Amino acid sequence: MSMIKPLCLALALVAVSAPAQAADFSDPTWPCVQRKVETLSLGLMWPYPVNSELANDNDALRADVTELAGYLSLRRVELETLRTRVDEFAATYEGDPEALGLVFESVFNTLSKRRARIISGIEDFSLSQIALAEKIDINRAEMDAILVTDEPDFDRVDMLEERLDWDQIIYTDRQRNITYLCETPTLLERRLFSIGQMLSGAVIDQG
């Protein structure tokens, strides 16, 4: 049986709770309505050059960047509550775009790696659901085949029926998490964009 057939069952369940929008379901490892974007570009979110070597010989700058980037990377902390910290950092370094760029680069690297792990997890989740759907189809086909024989093995049918019930419960319970899983990479993208906006807004024209 093709991998695409059981995937259609998963996608149908997703479609019930997900917002309607264009999606490409040709990739069996990606069950989300959201378009799959595997990698993000720092340059599209940060409008200034980033000098990654700037803090190598500046312990104070390196420590300040690490501290601020660590706070900004915490997903459950509202960004507006961190604006004061951003303003304090910007004041300390006179709105230097290179210093602020180091902060964004650090946050970008942290959240991009986290996002990549989540995408990989979604792909693994999708493949496990496909495998479970295939198992359900195989067991159902076997049960149907037994029932049409002259002397059905009802013990085997009972066992298959119990297995089917359990597998379908597991499949459905897992599927309820798909909307949240699919939203997470997008939420991280939005957070990165907002952080870039906040940090770039603290840049003071050096001209």
Image (cartoon, rainbow, N blue to C red):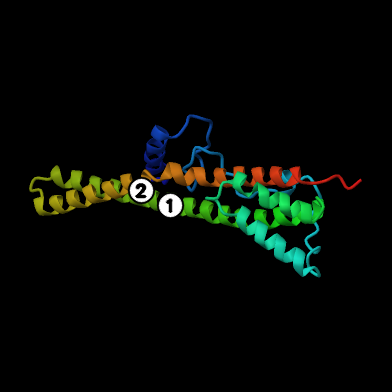
User: Nearest the camera: 8 or 165?
Assistant: 165
Task: Of the two numbered discs 2 and 1 on the same chain, state the one appearing first in sequence.
Answer: 1
Q: State the count of labels.
A: 2
Residue 125: mark: 1
Vertical position of residue 117 compared to residue 201: above or below: below
Q: Residue furthest right?
A: 207
* Label 2 Cα crowd, 10 Å radius (few <14 / some 14-19 / many 20+): few
Residue type, mark 2 in image? Arg
* Residue 38: percent from left, percent from top: 60, 49
Rendered view: 59 above or below 9: below
Q: Is residue 197 left or right of residue 153?
A: right
Mark 1 neighbour density, 10 Å: few (under 14) some (14–19) many (20 or more): some
Residue 101 x %, y % = 76, 53
Q: What residue lies at 73% left-to-right and 54% top-to-bottom?
A: 89
Q: Which residue corresponds to the image point at 40% horizontal and 46% vertical from the top-left?
A: 177
Callout 1 amino acid: Phe
User: Looking at the image, do the residues carrying marks 2 and 1 touch, with CB atoms under 8 Å apart?
Assistant: yes
Residue 174: give its label: 2
Residue at left offset 55%, top offset 47%: 185
Q: Secondary structure at mark 2?
A: helix
Q: Quadrant of the C terminus?
A: top right
The residue at the point 14 percent across, 50 percent down is 157
Q: Is residue 14 left or right of residue 206?
A: left
Helix, strand or loop under label 1: helix
